[in-house]
């Protein structure tokens, strides 16, 4: 959640950037599921370089 909020994005928009559902973003933020695979790599890239790195 902190990463998404730092980038000033809603769950819906963040989900579009990562090509996942808004519900999955919500599950990650609530600790129900953990990101993996491509989504995890994209999250790491956004964390290091900002959302523009994947836009």
Image (cartoon, grey):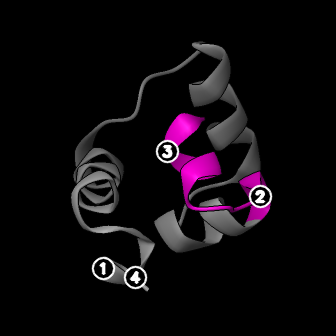
The residue located at (24%, 60%) in the rendering is 45
Name the quarter where the C terminus is drawn.
bottom left
State the image coordinates of residue 16 (x, y, percent, origin top left): 63, 71
Q: CA distance from mark 4 to mark 2?
A: 15 Å
Specify the quadrant of the image occupied by residue 49. Answer: bottom left
Task: Please name whichever residue, 19 or 12, is drawn nearer the observer in this view of the structure.
Answer: 12
* Gap between marks 4 and 3 measured at Cα: 13 Å
Residue range corresponding to the magenta coloring: 1-12
* Mark seen at residue 3: 3
Badge 4 or badge 2: first in the primary sequence: 2
The reply to whether discs 4 and 3 touch (Cβ–Cβ < 8 Å) is no
Asked whether the beta carbons under mark 4 and mark 1 sit within 8 Å of each other, the answer is: yes
Q: Which residue is mark 4?
A: 52
Say whether disc 2 or disc 1 marks the residue closer to the N-terminus.
2
Q: Which residue is labeled 2 in the image? A: 10
Q: Quadrant of the N terminus?
A: top right
């Amino acid at each position: 959640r902190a990463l998404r909020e730092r980038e000033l994005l809603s769950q819906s928009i963040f989900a579009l950037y990562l090509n996942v559902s808004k519900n999955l973003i919500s599950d990650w933020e609530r600790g129900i599921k953990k990101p993996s695979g491509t989504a995890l790599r994209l999250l790491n890239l956004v964390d290091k370089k900002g959302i523009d790195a994947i836009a």
